[in-house]
Structures are given as structure tokens and as C-alpha cells.
Image: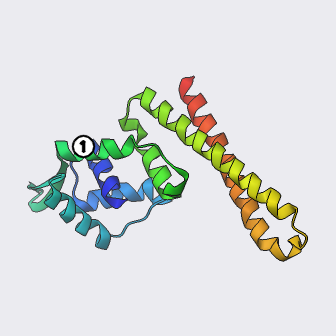
Amino acid sequence: MLEYIVLGIINYEDMTGYDIKKYMECGICVFYKASFGSLYPILKKLTKKGLVTMYESNNGGRNKNYYCITEEGKKIFEDWLETPITIDDGKGTQLVKIYFYDLLQEEKCRELLLKYRENNEKYLNELYELEKQYVTTRNKDCYYYKLSVLDYGIRVIQETIRWCDDIINRREL
């Protein structure tokens, strides 16, 4: 995941590792956190794969290493970004992808958000079916906390669907 976040961030402009970390702290950290200890090995890995290049620049008398996304890096990132979000991706992945949707054409964003909404609708129906099974169970008191977690999941998915509707509709105004 961190590889894609780094590619997305430096897609906007060349940055040092420190700049990338600060950028993350100003937005992405709401749903994804990374330390310097995990960031620098990722930058090294991306450089080795040819998805990122590194160059030195002397700003104010101090040499700094800047990272720049390559054309191959842009392609890999865009392919990942345009892959539809599934429920199994996990909350962090879903939000990271949507966070970078500004880099896509508006029609593609709409298509991906509608697909994400549809996937949530299907999952919600699965949760409702599961809920029906528990409700008809004789000893449902034995499942109080399981049902409470199921209720939480239903509420989260319902709100996710409303959120999708909201961002799609707001963008159309």
C-alpha cells in the first residue's frame, strides 16, 4: 500500500523523503500511517524497480535527495488507481484510492465510485441475510456481541453508501 501512496504523492511533484512524510501527515494519516523507518525502504525499493528516480539538489547549502516518479511508475500507479475497489480491500485501501481520484478523469472517477457503491450494496445485502439467520436463532442472547458487531458493520456500510452518493452528487453540481 505504501508504495502506491508514495507514487501518488510524487505524481504531483518531486519530493524528499521528509517532504513525503510531511505530506502524508497533512491528509493521508487520517486513514494510513507510515514511519520514516518504513518510508525510506519503500523509496529504495521503488528506485530499484525503476518506478522512481532519485537526484541530489543543493538547497541552501545542504544536499537533499529528491524522488521523481518515472513514466513506468505513473503507469503502475494509474493501473492500480483505476482498478475497482472491492469490499475485501480494507478501509485503508479504499480511502487511499479515492484520495488520489483527483489524478483521474472525472468520468472515470464517477464510474469507479458507482462500482464501489454497487459493491457495498451487495455486501450490505449479505450482511442483512446474515442478520436474518441470527434473529431466527433460539439462543440469540448468546450472540449479543456478535450481533452488535454485525450491526456495526451494517451501519458502516449504510453510511459508506450514503457517502458515495453524496460525493457523486456534490461533484455533479
Name the side, left or right, on which 18 lies relative to 52: right
- As displayed, is residue 136 above or below residue 123? below
Give the percent coordinates (x, y) of residue 38.
31, 70
Is residue 13 in view from this perspective? no
| Near-viewer residue (156 or 88) | 88
- Figure quadrant of residue 145: bottom right
Q: Which residue is mark 1?
A: 74
Extreme top residue here?
Answer: 173
| Near-viewer residue (147 or 129) | 129
Extreme right residue here?
Answer: 138
Q: What residue do we see at 60% from left, 29% from top? A: 169
Is residue 129 in view from this perspective? yes
| Near-viewer residue (66 or 100) | 100
| Crowdedness near tag 1: few (<14), some (14–19) or many (≥20) residues, C-alpha within 10 Å | some
| Quarter of the figure with the C terminus | top right
Q: What residue do we see at 49% from left, 56% from top? A: 89
- As displayed, is residue 52 above or below residue 83? below
Name the side, left or right, on which 161 lies relative to 54: right
Give the percent coordinates (x, y) of residue 100.
40, 43
| Near-viewer residue (93 or 136) | 136
- As displayed, is residue 122 above or below residue 56? above
Give the percent coordinates (x, y) of residue 154.
72, 54
| Quarter of the figure with the N terminus | bottom left
Secondary structure found at label 1: helix
How many tags in the picture? 1
| Amino acid at dot 1 | Lys
- Figure quadrant of residue 62: bottom left
Name the side, left or right, on which 96 lies relative to 131: left
Q: What residue do we see at 34% from left, 60% from top? A: 2
Q: What residue do we see at 72% from left, 66% from top? A: 149
Give the percent coordinates (x, y) of residue 81.
38, 44
